[in-house]
Amino acid sequence: MEPQLSPANLQHIRVSPKFRELEVRRSRLVWALCAIVLAAYYGLMIVVAFWPDALHVPLSEGRVVTIGVPIGAAIILLSWLLTGLYVYRANTAFDALNEQILREARP
Amino acid sequence: MKRLVLATATSLLPALTSAAALAAPAVSAAEKQPLNVPAIAMFFVFVLATLGITWWAARRTKTANDFFAAGGGISGFRNGLAIAGDYMSAATLLGACALVYGRGYDGLLYVAGFFVGWPVLLFLMAERLRNLGKYTFADVISERLDRTKMRSFAALGALTVVFFYLIVQMVGAGELVQLLFNVDYDYAVVAVGVLMMVYVAFGGMIATTWVQIVKAVLLLLGGTLLGILALAEFGFSFEALAARAVAAHKSGIKIMGPGTLLADPVSTLSLSLGAVFGLAGLPHILMRFFTVPNAKEARKSVFYASGFIGYFFLLSFVLGLAAVVIVGTDPQFFQGGKVGGALIGGGNMVALHLAKALGGNLLFGFLAAVAFATILAVVAGLALAGAAAISHDLYANVLRKGRTSEKSEVRVSQIATLGIGVIAIALGLLFKGQNLAFLVALAFGIAASANFPVLLLAMYWQGLTTRGALWGGLAGLSCAVVLVILSPAVWKAVLGNPAAIFPYDHPALISMPLAFLVAYVVSKLDTSAKAASERAAFGDQYVRGQIGLGAVAAAKH
């Protein structure tokens, strides 16, 4: 178990520059990625609702597969790749910063 | 057939959409499958293996941390598999395939909507949840707020979701087993309930986790095998498969683009809000984040879980299209041999018929056993989440105010598991043959409108007070319940009124924003001294949530 730090220590961490940096960088990434995923999905759903014919266009002349298929699959793939991106950033850069904060906080 | 697929489409996918379709047509004796020996043999192998796992897990379960969180020692990869196992119910296998079979491209759009909940869960919740909680999500929301009130609220939210979800699974299990194994519905429900009690009461989270992992691996293997066999029929060309599907389907080329299923933007928005944010309020999914050693592994689990789930969703699109060609043109799968009529066993049999067409009785038996294993694993996860809410939240923290031993906490949850099992069996028998699509809407609606808003605000918003959280959560919960009662699925389909008062089957569009609004306004208006101290305590919680200081460590063994 980590030693329980007193509220004073936690207050101290909260105003430290490293913690501020972690906080800002992480929340910037989190909100950007959330926005991309939700915009991609709801963007597609808006097309489905108002311009469904746009997704019925064949991939190329004479083919049956429409552009809608790779776009639909891409929503799933993109969402998954972005979780990968977040995990990679968080497990390397953010965790390194996190480790420094914890080290400095130890009495 | 069309009606069945519609019923499938209007309910939410992961929680056995098939229950509605399976339950709707009473299965006549003539329709039942003949006794399927390979299926039953494989099913027994699975049951014996999982009982072996339970016996092994029971010997390793010594502390409350072992029982509720598997000692916090599950790796990110294994937990990812287990999360996928918890999330992918029989409906994901059977329902998604049936949806693509009936609706083509709309089925792909539908599952994509469920998928986007995963990145959101990771970005907003996973690490803070792991850093702040111990066994249940109530740990996080009661941290700086009133312990008794918030725990009681969280237990209410968790238990309602668990029970609605459980009923659907039990009824689905009964129908499925009756259909697949030619075993009586009542026996099937009792068997599912008893096995669930054994896994959870004796093996706790360790057994539950491994049952999920085994099931997820079986599901992925079975699906992949089916996918390879299906694609081989078309020379591994998706274009060839699509061309044949278009030629065979009654809607023709229309199945390769959006149809009518998700054409109404408001209805689709309400459905997807429930699917995306409901995920972040499902107690059995949230509980899985406490089984990993730290935030790093918690994040990895979502990456692996969503990889498996996304793969399976894409696979079901391929399987559904293949079934259009292979099952949809073969008279042996239709009642009376009439191609284009009703499928034998109902709309959700598509994947199983496909297995039979591609791999004979053996593959059919394997997939049937996997479908049943899937139900068992999901109900075990639900029962454990319910038992944790009763013992950790209600008994240990509300009733005994934290003055209790680990031993008695585990004992109470074992008793609670038995209670949940008995109630689940009783409800499963009671709701036999009912159309339960609305219960799934309700479970996700409540998860998205009560559990999720309170949890999110507790972690992110300094201004949240106990009063605001309670009012907001209860407003979301009751609004979701009322709207579902007034929706077409209950008001029209169950109660037999000519028209529904609320036009949409899914309540989240109204109930989720309402929960946030009420929580915000009531918190803002709360000028009590207690509210001030609750706001002041946010800073410490915020720091610990970010950096994991003081987070529960993994047990050493």
Image (cartoon, helix red, strand yellow):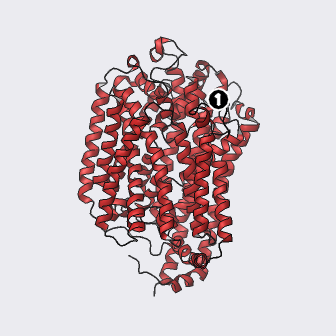
User: Which residue is located at x 63 percent, y 48 percent?
Assistant: B508
Q: Position of residue A66 (x, y in %)?
A: 67, 31
Q: Position of residue A62 (x, y in %)?
A: 69, 24
Question: Up-down: is B180 above or below B399?
Answer: above
User: Which residue is located at x 29 percent, y 27 percent?
Assistant: B38
Q: Position of residue B231 (x, y in %)?
A: 49, 28
Residue B158 falls left or right of residue B195: right
| Amino acid type at mark 1 | Met
Which quarter of the figure is the C terminus of chain B placed in?
A: bottom left
Can residue A64 be seen? no
Judging by the rendered image, the residue that carries numbered circle 1 is B256
Disc 1 on helix, strand or loop? helix
User: Which residue is located at x 39 percent, y 16 percent?
Assistant: B30
Q: Position of residue B210 (x, y in %)?
A: 34, 50
Give the quarter of the image for residue B103. top right
Give whichever of B468, B86 is nearer the camera: B468
